[in-house]
Image: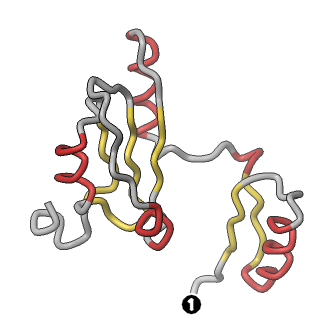
Amino acid sequence: MREVTGEWGVDCVIDNLGIPAIWQQYRDTLADMGRVVDSGVIARDPLPVRLLPFYLRSQSLIGVRTGNRAHIARLWRDVAAGFRVPEAFVDTRPWEAVGDAHWTIEMGISRGQAVLEVPAA
């Protein structure tokens, strides 16, 4: 997959099975800031999740229960929208305010996802 994507990797993997051998197959193909969406599990074996690579590459593991057609349709709408955080939970600041953004996160008073705006060059 990395060869096909120009070494970038895949942005999103939908896993409806939760099988450790398959997890190992696609895990290394996930791009930086990529997402794994777990929407089902048929296996009972634990997945070998190493958190350090997720952290270092800003990746996400998202669980979505898809118990009926409406849930499945909502999942694919969210995938198409890129799993964006609702605006009410986005704290946008100029990049020069990075210290303030860190402070609100550390104090537990941030209102959601911190986004720093960098002016166009």
Residue 50 percent location from the top left of the image? 40, 60
User: Is residue 118 shown above or below 107?
Assistant: below
* Towards the viewer: 82 or 64: 64
Query: What is the residue that sits farthest to the top in this orientation?
Result: 68
* Towards the viewer: 23 or 110: 23
Looking at the image, residue 8 sits to the left or right of residue 34; the answer is: left
Disc 1 marks which amino acid? Ala
Looking at the image, residue 14 sits to the left or right of residue 103; the answer is: left
Report helix, strand or loop for mark 1. Answer: loop
* Towards the viewer: 99 or 88: 99
Residue at image x 47%, y 53%? 60
User: Which quadrant holds residue 8?
Assistant: bottom left
How many residues crowd mark 1 within 10 Å: few (<14), some (14–19), many (20+)?
few
User: Is residue 115 shown above or below 74?
Assistant: below
User: Which quadrant holds residue 102?
Assistant: bottom right
Residue 32 percent location from the top left of the image? 38, 67
Query: What is the residue that sits farthest to the left in this orientation?
Result: 3
Residue at image x 77%, y 45%? 88
Residue 114 percent location from the top left of the image? 71, 64
Q: Which residue is mark 1?
A: 121
Residue 92 percent location from the top left of the image? 75, 64
Looking at the image, residue 23 sits to the left or right of residue 82; the answer is: left
Residue at image x 45%, y 47%? 61
Query: What is the residue that sits farthest to the bottom in this orientation?
Result: 121
Residue at image x 17%, y 45%? 21
The C terminus appears in which quarter of the rendering?
bottom right
